[in-house]
Image (spheres, coloured by chain):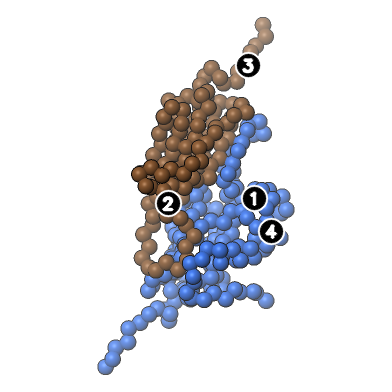
Chain colours: A blue, B brown
Amino acid sequence: MALIRYQAPELAPWEAADRWSNLRDDLNSFFELPFWSSFGRGGQLFTGWSPALDLYQNNDNVVAVIELPGMRKEEIEISLHDGMLTISGERKRESSSNGDNAERTERYIGAFRRSIALPTRVDANKVSATYRDGILTVTLPKAEEVKPKQIQVS
Amino acid sequence: MNTLTRENRDGDRAQGEQFIAPPASVIEAGDGYTLEVEMPGVNKDGLDISIENNQLTITGRRSFPVVEGTLIHRESRPENFRRTFELDPSIDADKINAKIDQGLVRLTLPKAEHVKPRKITVS
């Protein structure tokens, strides 16, 4: 049985509300990934890389904009399931660093996953995405029946 | 070798423009440093790198994707990026090289010749 979080259509712009979905995702991925891969997050369970996500909607589309600097588009996975959009991927260490080199990093390296419940039904076959300047833009056209329609009074 | 680069984390308030300091990584190799700074939404036109008195300042101005519609949920911040680093004097400032790819700025800062580690042969 899948546990789906109920999402009201009008989501208040409160950033902390999404931390619960991050918490669930973190717990899910914590058990899936090998134990040592949490090293990249500094061994902390509930923090780690959570890329910023903005969600827009207009009459025709729902658009998700995610900040993902320094990745290759082949490393990004986008999936849609039960009204939830999930973006995941893994950022690998690009430069060759041998053991002799001193290193100090604030950037998160490793796997990430973000999920967000979509406000309406979308047409999964028509979803498109572009990745430019480190920003991933996912355009999800709304399903026909949920688009607003004008009704003529005869 | 113990001192990599010190950085200045004060938020810049020059001319009323607000900046946030982006996360960065420094790797030191024998012949130089590699500095990586994350600036999503910044491309070559919005990037400005300058050096003054051993201080390297990187400024990135975002070009936001134009999305028509109402905003339902927001986590990103609108401010541009700026960060200042104090350079190790062994860095040869004329040979600094910078590239930006998908919002990640990568700078190579080679050390001046005379400080590179070298082998000394025993005759």
Q: Residue at x 47, y 57 (%)?
A: B76
- Mark 1–mark 4 distance (CA, rounded to whole Å): 11 Å
Can residue B44 be spotted in the picture?
no
The spot of residue A140 in percent (x, y) is 45, 68
Amino acid type, mark 3: Lys
Q: Amino acid at mark 1?
A: Arg
Label 2 neighbourhood size at 10 Å, few (<14), some (14-19), many (20+)?
Answer: some
Q: Residues within 10 Å of mark 3 (few under 14, many from 20)?
A: few
Secondary structure category for the residue under label 3: loop
Which residue position holds label 4? A30
Name the residue rendered at 65%, 74% in the picture.
A2
Q: Indicate which label's residue lies in the foreground, 2 or 4.
A: 2
- Please identify, in this view, whether the residue under mark 2 or under mark 3 is nearer the observer: 2
Give the spatial CA distance, label 2 vs label 4: 32 Å
- Element marked by disc 1: helix
Mark 1 / mark 4, whichever is N-terminal: 4
Contact (Cβ within 8 Å) of mark 1 with mark 4: no
The residue to which callout 3 is attached is: B119
If you read the primary sequence from the N terminus, does the residue marked by circle 2 or circle 3 appear first? 2
- Residue identifier under label 2: B79
Q: Are marks 2 and 4 on the same chain?
A: no
Residue A40 in percent (x, y) is at 65, 48
Q: Which residue is mark 1?
A: A41
In the image, taking residue A71 as reference, residue A29 lies left or right, namely right
Q: Report the label total.
A: 4
Residue nearest the viewer, comparing B9 with A41: B9
